[in-house]
Amino acid sequence: MALFVTFEGLDGSGKSTHLERAARWLSESGVPHVVTREPGGTELGGAIRQVFLDRRFQGMDGTIELLLVFASRRQHLLEVIEPALAAGRHVLCDRFTDSTRAYQGAGRGVAEEVIDRVDLLATGGRCPDRTLLFDLPAEVARRRGHSAPRRRSGGVDRLDAEELDFYQRVRDGFLALAARDPKRFRVIDSLGSLESTAAAVRAALADLVEPTR
Ligand code: TMP
């Protein structure tokens, strides 16, 4: 059965690099899969992503953010995720609703019941089969997200520019989600070397390459 696998963590946690590596490994092993991300993954999602990350829109509150990410997510599920799974391809997705619960919920203070209601409307409460959470201290993630090359290339977006206590609340939010659903989550220490983190990712996805009989 095709699995819906999500990669989650703070900006600067290395999840996107590890998603790329995992996808390369699946390709080399001949495992059918699709790589995608949120906000984004479709033409509409890409347009929403641009608005969402644009530093001109500093006044956007958590509820506006919530509505934007779920609009992108609904289109993404309908156009990309569900069709891929139905065709027997694993889906590796960079962020999904756990990011909304961590960033808009824990980070911005949007109530959990509000997120649940919008989630039900937009996705029917669709949940990933497995979630890899790349964890590292908030100050390290923020420093990496603000690296000099990233600033020079204009790569620091609206959320990267948030203060350290926001990063801390988001990290705590992610860890609380993982504690609540230990069967779905694999918490991966992202502080060690690239190789040790990559090995942990391969261990978390080993059954995709060598399904147990
Ligand atoms: P990315 O840089 O990992 O692609 O993520 C873009 C930003 O969007 C990142 O700062 C986290 C944020 N985000 C939310 O705040 N809520 C969400 O639901 C998603 C999917 C992303």
Image (tube, rainbow, N blue to C red):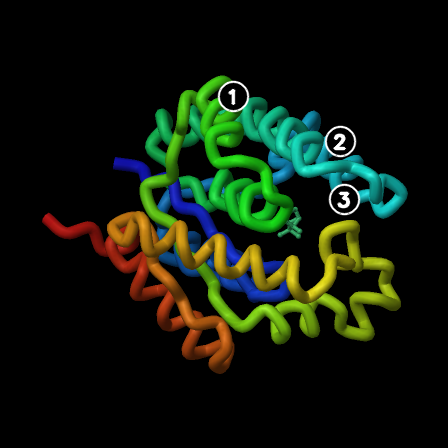
Say whether residue 94 is visible.
Answer: no
Labelled pair 1, 3 in contact (Cβ < 8 Å) = no
Image coordinates of residue 82 in percent, x first then y, are: 43, 26
Task: Calculate the distance from the C-alpha at mark 1 to the C-alpha at mark 3.
Answer: 21 Å
Labelled pair 2, 1 in contact (Cβ < 8 Å) = no
Task: Calculate the distance from the C-alpha at mark 2 to the C-alpha at mark 1.
Answer: 18 Å
Q: Earlier in the sequence, mark 3 or mark 2?
A: 2
Disc 2: which residue: 47
Task: Calculate the distance from the C-alpha at mark 3 to the C-alpha at mark 2.
Answer: 10 Å
Within-10-Å neighbours for mark 3: few <14, some 14–19, many 20+ = some
Image coordinates of residue 125 in percent, x first then y, are: 40, 27
Image coordinates of residue 57 in percent, x first then y, are: 85, 40
Q: From what the image shows, is residue 147 above or below residue 78?
A: below
Give the secondary structure at mark 2.
helix
Q: How many marks?
A: 3
Q: Quadrant of residue 67?
A: top right
Disc 3: which residue: 53
For disc 3, does the CB lie below 8 Å from ligand 1?
A: yes
Q: Amino acid at mark 3?
A: Leu
Within-10-Å neighbours for mark 1: few <14, some 14–19, many 20+ = some
In front: label 2 or label 1: 1
Give the secondary structure at mark 3.
helix
Image coordinates of residue 134 in percent, x first then y, are: 47, 63
Q: Earlier in the sequence, mark 2 or mark 1?
A: 2
Disc 1: which residue: 122
- Camera-nearest residue between 189 and 119: 119
Q: Is residue 22 left or right of residue 181?
A: right
At horizontal 64% and vertical 36% (from top left) the residue drawn is: 40
Q: Earlier in the sequence, mark 1 or mark 3?
A: 3
Within-10-Å neighbours for mark 2: few <14, some 14–19, many 20+ = few
Q: Is residue 41 left or right of residue 127?
A: right
